[in-house]
C-alpha cells in the first residue's frame, strides 16, 4: 500500500495554524492567542473537496462514502494534515522548538504556510501593528534551507570520500544523504533534473551544494501560501505586496476564524452555510432556522461585506484544493462492479495524475494478482494505461482468487 499524502501546516506562532486546522477538520486542535499553544505535532484528518463521480453519473442519491462525505456531488476526501509546532527565527540552530519543528516536517508532501497577512503579530508571534509579513515568507524558507544545508554540509568531507570510494552515482549518494527526509530516488531525481549540466559531486563547491539544496526543497516541500486574517483591514496592502513579490507561488486568501465561526453557527442551527462559497442562508431565507438577534445579524452582515462578498469565500476549502493541485492529486473511485445498483462510490482515494492503472491497483489492494481491469461501460483497460480526471478514474479491479 502506498503511504498517505501528508500536508503540513506551518508558520510562526499565532499566525492561525490551529484555527485553520480547525476550519479544515472536525478535530479540536487547541486554539490560543499565545505563542506555543501547539506543542506537539497535531495530526488530523482534513477533507479535500472534489467533484464526485456520482455527479457525473447522476447517481447522487445513491452515493454513500465509507469515509468523508458527499453532499450533492461534492465529495470530501480525507487527507492527512499535520499542525507543526510554532517556529521562531533561527529554529535550525535549535531555538524555540525549532529542531523539533523541522524534524516533524520530514513526513510532509507539501506545506501550507499560514502567513498572518494582517501584520498584527511580529516574527515571534507577539502582538504588534504594521509588521511586514513578507519577512515571514523569506524567513521560513530560509530556516528550512539552512536546516537541510547544515545537515548535509556537516559531513560533506566524508560524503565525498565515500562517494568516490564506492564509485556511486550522484543520485545514489544524495539518496543516502537525503533519504531521511522521506525522499525516494524518484523525488531526488526530479530535483537533479532541475539542474542540468551539474558538475560531478566531488567537484561541488558551496554554491553548488546550495543550489542542490534549493532544488531539493522545491520538489520535497512545495509550498502554498495561506494569506490568513484577510478579514483584517491591514491585510489588503500586505496581500498585494506578497503576490507581487511571489507571482509563481500559489497563494490563497483565507479567514479561518470566519470559517470556524460560520461552521459553529451552522452547527447550532442559525444558518445554512456551504463551505467554499459566499452563501449564507438565515431564517429570512429558510424557514426552520433559528431566528438571529441583532448582534448576530450584524456580525453576519459584516462577514458578508468584509469577507464573503469581497473574496468569494473564506478560502479554506480552496486552500486544500490548491495543495492537491500542486501535488497533482486526483480522485480515483475503485468499484466492485460496473452495475451501479444500490449504494455507489463507497471508496475514493487520491492518486497522482498520470499514474499507471496497475500502480493504482497496488496502492489500493497491495500485491495482489490482477486478472482484468474493467472501465465504465464494461471496456477492458490495460495495466499500463494511466489515470486522469474523467479517464480511467472509475475502475473495477478483478483479482485472481488467492493470487498473491
Ligand atoms: N482576525 C483574524 N484572526 C485570526 C484568524 N485566524 C486566527 N486568528 C487569531 O489569531 C490568534 C492565533 O491563532 P492560532 O490558531 O492559535 O495560531 P497558531 O498559529 O496555531 O499559534 P501557535 O499555537 O502559537 O503556534 C487567535 O487569537 C486567533 O483567534 C483570522 O482568520 N482572522
Image: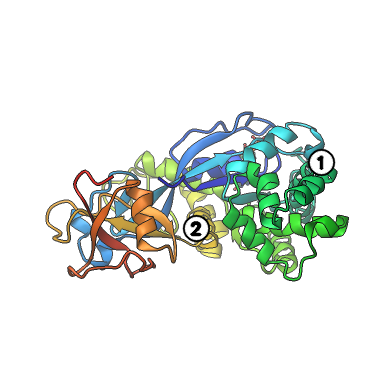
Q: Identify the mark at residue 324; answer none if there is no mark.
A: 2
When asked about the image quadrant of residue 351, the answer is bottom left
Which numbered tag is attached to residue 118?
none
* Image position of 10 (left or right of 72): right
SS at circle 1: loop
Q: Nearer the viewer, residue 164 or 346?
A: 164
The N terminus: image quadrant: top left
Circle 2 packing at 10 Å, graded few (<14), some (14-19), many (20+), is many
**Above/below status of 327 relative to 404:** below
Q: As rendered, which of 302 and 25 lies closer to the eye?
A: 25
Q: Which mark is residue 155?
A: 1
Which element carries disc 2, helix, strand or loop? Answer: helix
Q: Residue at x 55, y 61 (%)?
A: 326
Residue 216, given in percent of the width and then of the height, sits at: 69, 56
Q: Nearer the viewer, mark 1 or mark 2?
A: 1
Q: Is mark 1 within 8 Å of ligand 1?
A: no
Q: Quadrant of the C terminus?
A: top left
User: Does residue 287 lie above or below 269 as drawn?
Assistant: below
- Disc 1 packing (10 Å; few <14; some 14–19; many ≥20): few
Instruction: Kindly identify the residue that appears in the image at 35 percent across and 59 percent down.
Output: 358
- Relative to 320, is 39 above or below? above
* Label located before the other in sequence (1 or 2): 1
The residues tagged by marks 1 and 2 sit, at their Cα atoms, a distance apart of 35 Å
Question: Is residue 237 shown to the viewer in this render?
Answer: yes
Whereabouts is ligand 1, in terms of quadrant?
A: top right
Q: Residue at x 65, y 49 (%)?
A: 175
In the rendered structure, the answer to whether residue 120 lies left or right of residue 49 reads right
Provide residue 59's location: percent of width, then percent of height: 20, 61
Q: Is residue 90 left or right of residue 87?
A: right
Tell me where residue 126 appears, x and y as whole percent: 76, 37
Amino acid at each position: 500500500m502506498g503511504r498517505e499524502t501528508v500536508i503540513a501546516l506551518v508558520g510562526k506562532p499565532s499566525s492561525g495554524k490551529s484555527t485553520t486546522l480547525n476550519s479544515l477538520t472536525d478535530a479540536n486542535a487547541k486554539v490560543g492567542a499565545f505563542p506555543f499553544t501547539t506543542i506537539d505535532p497535531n495530526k488530523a484528518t482534513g477533507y479535500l473537496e472534489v467533484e464526485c463521480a456520482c455527479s457525473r453519473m447522476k447517481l447522487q442519491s445513491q452515493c454513500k462514502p465509507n469515509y468523508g462525505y458527499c453532499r450533492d456531488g461534492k465529495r470530501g476526501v480525507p487527507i492527512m494534515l499535520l499542525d507543526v509546532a510554532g517556529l521562531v527565527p533561527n529554529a535550525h540552530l535549535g531555538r524555540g522548538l525549532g529542531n523539533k519543528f523541522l524534524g516533524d516536517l520530514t513526513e510532509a508532501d507539501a506545506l501550507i504556510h499560514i502567513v498572518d497577512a494582517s501584520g498584527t503579530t511580529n516574527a515571534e508571534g507577539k502582538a504588534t501593528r504594521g509588521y511586514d509579513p513578507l519577512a515571514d515568507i523569506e524567513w521560513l524558507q530560509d530556516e528550512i534551507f539552512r536546516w537541510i544545508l547544515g545537515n548535509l554540509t556537516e559531513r560533506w568531507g566524508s560524503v565525498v570520500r565515500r562517494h568516490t570510494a564506492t564509485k556511486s552515482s550522484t543520485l545514489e549518494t544524495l539518496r543516502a544523504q537525503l533519504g531521511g527526509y522521506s525522499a525516494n530516488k524518484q523525488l531526488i531525481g526530479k530535483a537533479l533534473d532541475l539542474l542540468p549540466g551539474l558538475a560531478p559531486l566531488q567537484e561541488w563547491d558551496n554554491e553548488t551544494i546550495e543550489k542542490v539544496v534549493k532544488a531539493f526543497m522545491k520538489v520535497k516541500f512545495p509550498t502554498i501560501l495561506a494569506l490568513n486574517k484577510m478579514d483584517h483591514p491591514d491585510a489588503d496592502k500586505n496581500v498585494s505586496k506578497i503576490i507581487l513579490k511571489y507571482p509563481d507561488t500559489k497563494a490563497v486568501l483565507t479567514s479561518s476564524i470566519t470559517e470556524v465561526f460560520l461552521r459553529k453557527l451552522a452547527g447550532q442551527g442559525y444558518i445554512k452555510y456551504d463551505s467554499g462559497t459566499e452563501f449564507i442562508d438565515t431564517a429570512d431565507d429558510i424557514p426552520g432556522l433559528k431566528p438571529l438577534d441583532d448582534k448576530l445579524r450584524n456580525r453576519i452582515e459584516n462577514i458578508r461585506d468584509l469577507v464573503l462578498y469581497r473574496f468569494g469565500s473564506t478560502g479554506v476549502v480552496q486552500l486544500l484544493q490548491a495543495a492537491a493541485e500542486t501535488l497533482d492529486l486526483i480522485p480515483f473511485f475503485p468499484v466492485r462492479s460496473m452495475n451501479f445498483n444500490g449504494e455507489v462510490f463507497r471508496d475514493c482515494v487520491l492518486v497522482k495524475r498520470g499514474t499507471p492503472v496497475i500502480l493504482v491497483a497496488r496502492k489500493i489492494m497491495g500485491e495482489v494478482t490482477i486478472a482484468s481491469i474493467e472501465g465504465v461501460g464494461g471496456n477492458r483497460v490495460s495495466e499500463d494505461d494511466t489515470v486522469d480526471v474523467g479517464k480511467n478514474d472509475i475502475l473495477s479491479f478483478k483479482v485472481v482468487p488467492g493470487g498473491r
